Amino acid sequence: MTSPYARELEIAQLAVQRAAILTKRVFREKAKGTVSKDDASPVTIGDFGAQALIIAALRANFPGDAIVAEEEAAQLRSDAGLRGLIWDLVRSTRLSGAAEEALGGVRDEADLLEVLDLGRSEGGRKGRVWTIDPIDGTKGFLRGGQYALALALLEDGDVKVGVLGCPNLPVDDEAPLEADIGANQTDEEGRGVIFSAVVGQGATSRPLGTGGLTEGKSIRMKEVTEMANACFCESVESGHSNQSDSAQIAQKLGITKPSVRMDSQAKYGSIARGAGDIYLRLPTSKTYQEKIWDHAAGDLIVREAGGQVTDTKGQRLDFGVGRTLATNSGVVAAPAAVHGRVLEVVQEVLGLK
Ligand SMILES: Nc1ncnc2c1ncn2[C@@H]1O[C@H](COP(=O)(O)O)[C@@H](OP(=O)(O)O)[C@H]1O
Ligand SMILES: [Mg+2]
Ligand SMILES: [Mg+2]
Ligand SMILES: [Mg+2]
């Protein structure tokens, strides 16, 4: 008997692997086709192209499922030049060998727009919903730092399958955490990893390849025996997470090492395999709502590796309330044994208790 979600996990990983071939191609090019979104954040031809390829794979394999994806086609309808660039990338990106046969494709430019807009579901508490962040950490991607391709399956609001492709992280689970220096590391030997998890089945890492999937290794969080030696990760962007609050929290916890700043859900993957210990995301505004695609895959991967993930109020992240985590505030992810202590200090510093 195959284990639950085996096919979803396989297709999700192949879809992420194929889309990562595209983002790596864009990464190597000087012109990344960057345009600004309504909220002034950047999006590139890599984001659009990767989202189209991932959705095409889901459409071919799970046609009845809803999809909540970060990007949409609107800007491409009025910009034929940008659309053409993306179409050229999408039509020419494939996995090697038989793996490609399991994944559907995009037929033409009109289909490209249609496929991108399949990701406009409102999400919610009912049924199967895939959530996609084609490039998480777009600013990191542009800087040559860390970024991730994130894909997760929710069922009735709970994350069942999570996949994170991290083209710039070391394959080696034992490699020490590196500060995000923004060097172009994509094509370096030994980089590119996929983290994955299925609910109740643990978490795994494997090299990010270009064809079929290679064998995975089980990953676990590291035990924190002394808080002073704990290593915590946070965003590079001070607009995404309050770095002065986190410095105070670290100090109160007795953590002596400086934080490791890296973009994207590579932070979740890194703590899940014990390269780091704690991930804090502390609100910078009262009104910002975290997006489900920024957290769903990472949340499950960390929990399946022995971690606990809550918001700053101590509540589990609730992926069933729509496209955003409207009822949550920030993120506190840590090994289960120390999560309570970390949360206590977070709440002290943020004045939540
Ligand atoms: N004010 C804010 N607070 C928290 N997160 C924000 C934010 N503005 C943007 N983001 C999100 O932060 C994500 C990157 O996270 P990190 O800082 O961990 O790298 C972005 O994902 P994208 O890069 O996919 O747009 C974006 O969705
Ligand atoms: Mg974005
Ligand atoms: Mg994101
Ligand atoms: Mg993104």
Image: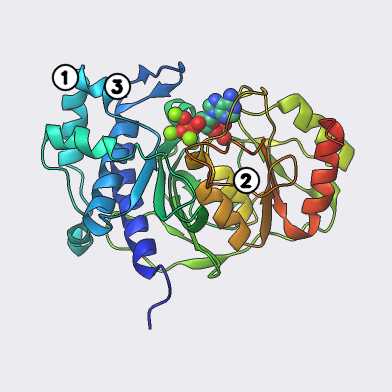
Residue depicted at 76% across the width and 32% down the height: 246
| Residue type at tag 1 | Ala
Residue 347, x across and y down, in percent = 82, 37
Secondary-structure class at tag 1:
helix
Task: Report whether residue 313 is seen.
Answer: yes
Secondary-structure class at tag 3:
loop
Residue depicted at 32% across the width and 53% down the height: 65
- The mark closer to the camera, 2 or 3, is 3
Front residue of this view, candidates 7 and 317: 317
- Marks 1 and 2 close (CB-CB < 8 Å): no
**Would the CB of label 3 be found within 8 Å of ligand 2?**
no
Among all residues in the image, which is located at the extreme left?
108
Residue 190, x across and y down, in percent = 44, 52
Residue 123 relative to residue 10: left or right: right
| Residue type at tag 3 | Gly
Provide the residue designation for mark 3. Answer: 33
- The mark closer to the camera, 1 or 2, is 1
Above or below residue 78? Residue 254 is below
Provide the residue designation for mark 2. Answer: 177
Residue 316, x across and y down, in percent = 66, 50
Front residue of this view, candidates 15 and 210: 15
